[in-house]
Image (cartoon, helix red, strand yellow):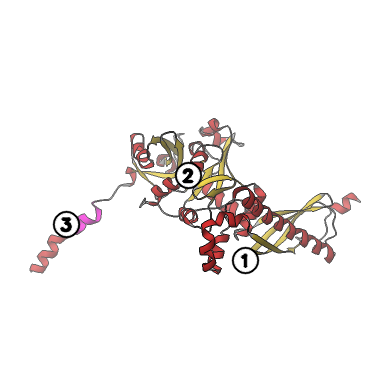
Amino acid sequence: MKKMLKVFLMLPIICLSGCWSSIELNELAIVTAMGIDKTEDGYLVSVQVLNSSELAGDARSGRTEVVTFRKSGVTIAEAIRSLSTDVPRRLYVAHLREIVFGEEMARAGIAKPLDVLSRQKELRSDFYMTVAKGSTAYDTLNVQTALEKIPANKVFDSLENSERRWAPTRTVTLDELVSSIVSKGRQAMLTGIYVYGDPESGSKVTNAQNISPKSGLRLDYLGVFKKDKLVGWLNRNDSKGVSYITDHVKSTAVNIPCEGEQITVNTTSSKTKIKGEVKNGNPKIDINVTSEGSLGEVECTIDLTKPEKIEELNKRYAKDIKDKIEGSIKTLQEKYQSDIFGFGEEIHRTDPKAWKRLEGNWDQEFANLDVIVTVTAKIRNLGTISESFQKEIEE
């Protein structure tokens, strides 16, 4: 009987402990994107919040699906807290898809913002980090996008799709970014994003309703960091070269010159192996790339039925990839002295003793590093026709 009484008395406590700290969904403001900009005396934090009433059900009032709020503060935490004066609900960041740093913020250093973000218990690790190229983070969060109702989802999906099918861009998570910044053998990189067209018209609901939007968000190429500071931008070819070296090319297009025209090879697979060693006290890196592709477009009148022509194309295919890789290495060594490839980590793995001597001056060692590039590339598929009908038309 006493045991039954104890259980009966404990039931209210058990029930209360399960729900005393619960928060109803209608009390939350779900944040999909966050922007961090540098100001003269602190930071400007922008958040893109879902307008749930416009996303639920079929009825529409004509209001936007997302709303952007911004506040300044001496610290980031203060700016986030002060957003409560505009947002009537508690900010909930567990569904965050994107964080954007303004370019000025990125060049000043992102260590403090990363420290704040890393301390947040609600944050998951499946969102991506980007830099607003030539503009502020707020500008990028203030644009309505077509196809996707939620702009943050548009950027998130574009990053994944571009990395998978194009190669000059990169998805980078919070954990990956922090790991690169604290590593002594690898520097960080982030994809750039910018607003094309008229930023003012991009904030209007009608922008997403046009068949040809006057403004929108577009991914750029890779931004190069030294420690936590952005030092510059790579062009398309150098960004692709970085992706080849770091084994992040899943699919892309390679243009090969042919009789004054172009042949496009669609790369279907690519594998990179990097080997580091130290000889006579000097570090050395060997890069071996193996790529395969299929013909996507033939503008010239080459006879693809001849094996020697295919072999010639294979050599040009390999040369294009090698040129991009060597070009990116030259840019990073001579212009930025920033090892975003992780060559230092490879030397550390293969010769830890030598790395202890090299790591203190790795920027200079990297700038003079001997890198040997070997590329093997083959066209495995000619498409559904072996000879272009353009030849018959020209005859």
Q: Is residue 303 visible?
A: yes
Q: Amino acid at mark 1?
A: Lys
Q: CA distance from mark 3 to mark 1?
A: 62 Å
User: Is residue 203 depicted above or below 55 in this figure?
Assistant: above
Dot placed on the residue nearer the N-terminal end, 2 or 1: 2
Hey, which quadrant is residue 280 in on the image?
A: bottom right
Residue that numbered label 3 is attached to:
12
Q: CA distance from mark 2 to mark 3?
A: 52 Å
Residue that numbered label 2 is attached to:
109
State which region is magenta: 12-21
User: Is residue 318 depicted above or below 27 in this figure?
Assistant: below
Front residue (pair 39, 49):
39
Dot placed on the residue nearer the N-terminal end, 3 or 1: 3
Dot placed on the residue nearer the N-terminal end, 2 or 3: 3
Contact? badges 2 and 3 (CB < 8 Å): no
Using a 10 Å C-alpha cutoff, classify the residue at mark 3 as few (fewer than 14 neighbours), some (14 to 19) or many (20 or more). few
Instruction: Judge depth for marks 2 and 3 and give the one in front.
Output: 2
Is 149 magenta? The answer is no
Q: Secondary structure at mark 2?
A: loop
Q: CA distance from mark 2 to mark 1?
A: 32 Å
Left or right of residue 313: residue 48: left
Q: Amino acid at mark 3?
A: Pro
Instruction: Judge depth for marks 3 and 1 and give the one in front.
Output: 1
Residue 273's tag is 1
Q: Secondary structure at mark 3?
A: helix
Q: Is residue 305 visible?
A: no
